[in-house]
Amino acid sequence: ANGQTGLLPPPKGLVAPINVPQKLLMGPGPTNVSPRVQQASGLQLIGHMHAETFQIMDEIKAGMQYAFQTKNQWTLVISGPGHLGMEAVLVNLLEPGDKVLIGVNGLWGKRAVDLANRLGASPLALEQEAGKSLSLDEIEQGLSKHKPKVLFLVHSESSTGVMQPLVGVGDLCRKYDCLLVVDTVASLGGVPFFMDDWKIDAVYTGSQKVIGAPPGLAPISFGPRAVEAIKSRKSPVKSYLLNMNELTIQWQCGDPSIPRIYHHTPPVNLFYALREALAELTEEGLENVWKRHAEASARLHAGIRSLGLKLFVQNESDRLPTVTTILVPEGIDWKKVIQYLMEKHKIEIAGGLGPTVGKVFRIGVLGCNATPEKVDRVLQALKEGLEFAKLQGH
Ligand code: PMP
């Protein structure tokens, strides 16, 4: 009578209990969350326009200003993964035809070129070999040759394990009247970063890496020069969800007497988790968190060397402490090693990504997993995994 031919059967899998085993996440992210963060994400929902949620949003804003080391009022959170942070900076700062110079030494720079193209901007790649960072000289040459509106750099190229030095880049960008945008998804909290002192105009990160919350949120910050560029656009921002002119009102980033206006329904339970992760970061202290990550990374590198393995990044000062790339030894099937760690130890490590596929293992020491005990566990499992793969190879 309703025009139906019959009811589709209920899915059988949903009658069984959910399967979420305990795993140690030592890849480039996400990382495990602390018990406090885990508990917070399970709290009952309240509304996104309730006073208590606004307070949590204000606390997140303050926590992110601390983590980014910025006084920027436009410091808020995008409801989405790191990629959406990338989309947000580009869609707000670029108009059709605008030149954006992008440091490309791995997958993430390439991704930014792709997004800029989709927006109708004119991306120019400042290329560098995978495994190396760009020098100040190379950056200056690119700026003086192309005179871009925006320079986009990846602080933490997690596909290759390279950290891009940023000291001095902000001054160059001012000299060439260009905005400096930085992707810190895989580094923020794990290494020193000073948004204001380094004169960075826009930055974003991800919730699931060093910060240690679940994936799904991208903290972001725009400095005064970037805000000015957004406010003086000739064309409207080509995204509703990512339009900072409106989203900053829900986050009350401007005059506190202007009431918040509903823009979209954000994942409030992820806000709880991020708030607690930032509370833990604040309690431990940013400098202590940086130190803990540096120590965990040094311990990992020493362990890698004592296993007779080699790091992919040759220049020590280019090595990203949070994500380490290790050359896959000759004759070893990298997939077997990764599979062994997961099957025998429930430990996740990753293979290469983009230019490093098939060439490296990637091990992350992020957030609450940046400890000597977790590093030793992954090293022991890696040793066994390599022995297993060697036997299989013969
Ligand atoms: N940029 C960098 C440097 C990253 O490491 C990642 C995630 N691996 C991203 C962007 C994208 O983040 P997400 O997966 O959360 O979209």
Image (tube, grey):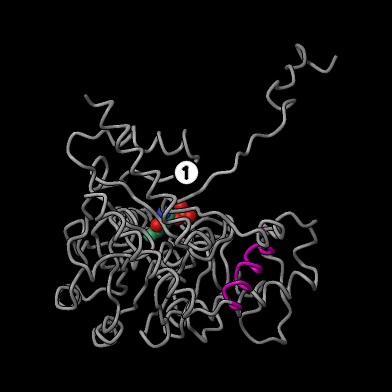
Measuring 61% from the left and 76% from the top, which residue is drawn there? 61
| Vertical order, 138 against 217 (above or below) | below
Measuring 79% from the left and 71% from the top, which residue is drawn there? 52
Residue 90 rendering spot, x and y as whole percentages: 41, 65
Q: Quadrant of the N terminus?
A: top right
Predominant SS along the magenta part: helix
Image quadrant of ligand 1? Answer: bottom left
Magenta segment: does it hold 271? yes
- Whether residue 13 sits left or right of residue 210 in the image: it is right
- Whether residue 328 sits left or right of residue 23 in the image: it is left
User: Which quadrant would residue 59 be assigned to in this image?
Assistant: bottom right
- Whether residue 55 sits left or right of residue 152 in the image: it is right
| Vertical order, 346 against 98 (above or below) | above
The secondary element bearing badge 1 is classed as strand
Q: Quadrant of the C terminus?
A: top left
Q: Give neighbour class at mark 1: few <14, some 14-19, many 20+ (Cα, 10 Å).
A: many
- In the depicted view, which residue is nearer to us: 237 or 290? 290
Span of residues in magenta: 270-283
- In the depicted view, which residue is nearer to us: 130 or 381? 381
Residue kind at label 1, given as amino acid type: Ile
Residue 213 rendering spot, x and y as whole percentages: 58, 60
Residue 224 rendering spot, x and y as whole percentages: 46, 85
Magenta segment: does it hold 127? no
* Residue denoted by label 1: 347
